[in-house]
Image (cartoon, rainbow, N blue to C red):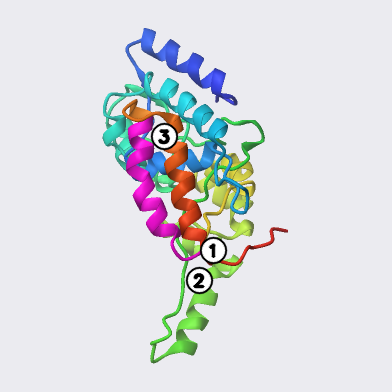
Amino acid sequence: MPHTHDEVVELGRQARKDGKWLGLPFVPTDAMCMLLTLGHPQENGEQFMAREAVEQAIAQLRQLAALSHPNSSKWNPIRCYDHMIAHDDVVYVPFAFGYVNYASKPERPNLRFADVPTPRCAGALLGGAGIGVSAQSKHKQAAVDYALFLCSSAYQRGDYVKAGGQPGSLAAWKDAEVNKLSGDFFTSTLRTIGSSYLRPTHPGFIAFFRECAPHAAAAIAGDMSAAELADHVNGLYHETRQGQPERSVA
């Protein structure tokens, strides 16, 4: 597996000689996710993402896009993975969320997953969804008890995985039997997960993300300059933080 950007580019060039491609899913949502992965965001910094960091990130992504399947701009990770299972013309995807189902379904060809190809895997955007209990629930305690059961390490590395779930428990990610069932999906990506970047949670961030996403995709496609993207992202992010208390980071 490639471990650096240059190694990914070399793989992409070799693939093109064989009539094959890299894959780089960059519909707007995933384009913004890749920008957050490579742009070194600083939530409490003078700029959310320095212009130089955005320019470098977009330059790298444009280089990868030029070696990627022509449908990449229409793909999210799931569409890309479905294509890879049905065809043999995409050899590698450097940045996309991981789905264990694609590594463990016995009735279809498997994909293999690995850490993202960046030194130290710093900053890779964390995906996934959480679980919560509604404040309006008429059975709050039962719901809380069930949520705790779902999150228990014993269940996470047992029936949860066997039923097709993707656990959040570290005990499950390190479990030998869980990895045997999934082609080592978990241990092969654990370094990336361990150093991943958690999206900000302050009010306004979701609207900021949604508004910036099409601009990130446009920049990767070459329809917007990286400098313009940086100015737009930093200006809008600053607006979302107006009146928000600064958070200390441990």
Q: Nearer the viewer, residue 127 or 215?
A: 215
Q: Is residue 206 left or right of residue 7?
A: left
**Disc 2 vs disc 1: Cβ atoms closer than 8 Å?**
yes
**Disc 3 vs disc 2: Cβ atoms closer than 8 Å?**
no
Callout 1 secondary element? helix
Quarter of the image with the N terminus is: top right
Mark 1 vs mark 3, foreground winner is 3
What's drawn in magenta, residue-wise? 202-219
Q: Percent position (x, y) of residue 138? A: 38, 92
How packed is label 2: few (under 14 Cα within 10 Å), some, or many (20 or more)? some
Q: Where is 164 relative to 233, above or below?
A: below
Q: Percent position (x, y) of residue 32? A: 42, 43
Q: CA distance from mark 3 to mark 2?
A: 45 Å
Which badge, 1 or 3, comes first in the chain's sequence? 1
Q: Where is 240 relative to 141, above or below?
A: above
Whether residue 81 is visible? yes
Amino acid type, label 1: Gln
Q: CA distance from mark 2 to mark 1?
A: 7 Å
Q: Nearer the viewer, residue 105 or 23?
A: 23
Q: Which mark is residue 150?
A: 2
Quarter of the image with the C terminus is: bottom right
Residue under circle 1?
A: 156
Quadrant assignment, res 245? bottom right
Callout 2 secondary element? helix
